[in-house]
Image (cartoon, rainbow, N blue to C red):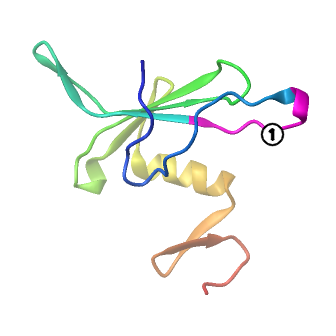
Amino acid sequence: MAEKSHHPDIPSRSNKMCDQTTGEFARLRVYHRKQHKKGRRTVSPRLLIKCGCCDSKVEIYYDEDPREQFAMLEINGVDGSVRDWRKVFLTLLRLKKQGGVFVEAGKKKP
């Protein structure tokens, strides 16, 4: 079973299912698995993100290559460079990079 997130950039949180009878909004349940050896092969680190109200999930495998131009992400079986995924998600989240800081599109850097 996946463990609670201990990734340094992901805050620790309760991963319990939401109670929809109280009108509670479904929070993402986030789990992190560190890189480890399985026999002779190395298993990449993974983030497992589950829906707060059902068992739907997204698996994100990543490598820890410090050279950003070679860093890769596999999201639900789709491989891509970190740069390519960043372009996709920053657009969806309406964020842009301004002077080394990510800000909401249309807003100026603080």
Seen as rendered, the residue at the extreme left is 40
Q: Where is residue 77 in the image (x, y as percent from the top left)?
A: 46, 23
Could you say which is closer to the camera, residue 24 or residue 61? 24
Is residue 6 rendered to the left or right of residue 43? Answer: right
Q: Which residues, given as a range, are shown in magenta?
A: 21-29
In the image, residue 86 lies in the stretch drawn in magenta: no
In this view, 57 is above or below 26:
above
Q: How many residues crowd around disc 1 within 10 Å: few (fewer than 14), some, or many (20 or more)? A: few
Seen as rendered, the residue at the extreme bottom is 110
Quarter of the figure with residue 103: bottom right
The residue where tag 1 is placed is 25
Predominant SS of the magenta segment: loop
Say which residue appears at 66% left-offset and 84% top-offset: 108
Which amino acid type is marked by label 1?
A: Phe
Q: Position of residue 80 (x, y in %)?
A: 42, 38
In the rendered image, the quadrant that contains the N terminus is top left
Is residue 46 rendered to the left or right of residue 51? Answer: left
In this view, 70 is above or below 55:
below
